[in-house]
Amino acid sequence: MAKQHIYTMSFSKVYPHYVTKGEKKGRTKTEVDEIICWLTGYSQEELGVQLEKQTDFETFFAEAPQMNPLRTLIKGVVCGVRVEDVEEPIMKEIRYLDKLIDELAKGKSMDKILRK
């Protein structure tokens, strides 16, 4: 089976869209970064390196220092697909991130987004 196009896409090309989506709703780049770091275990500096290297999505998630175990609490629909029903591991991680960014844009508090 061929790889999904998103897997080979540079994370740094999509990242500005995450930031823009949040900022359009009055949220900040700092909050977007906090979500990404919470999900993946990257530090702010490590996230910056990944963006500079233009790492693809598959590598970005495969090399993540520590995927947050609480991410399994993320439920809901992204692009018409239930996040919890996605079976392919990398796509599931991508959908988790998409769902968290959606929650940010919808005005949820950071405590709820980060499952505190």
Image: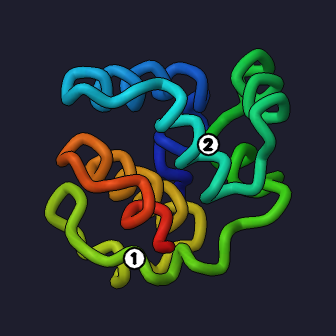
Q: CA distance from mark 1 to mark 2?
A: 16 Å
Residue 7 percent location from the top left of the image: 57, 45
Say whether marks 1 and 2 touch (CB < 8 Å). no
Q: Is residue 68 above or below residue 15?
A: below
Kind of element beneath mark 2: helix
What numbered label is drawn on residue 16?
none
Amino acid at the residue labelled 2: Phe
What numbered label is drawn on residue 57?
2
Residue 24 percent location from the top left of the image: 21, 22
Q: Write down the residue under mark 1.
A: 86
Amino acid at the residue labelled 1: Val
Q: Is residue 44 above or below residue 24?
A: below
Q: Is residue 95 above or below residue 47?
A: below
Residue 95 percent location from the top left of the image: 41, 59
User: Does 77 sit left or right of 37 as displayed?
Assistant: left
Q: Who's the residue at 50% across and 82% down the image?
A: 72
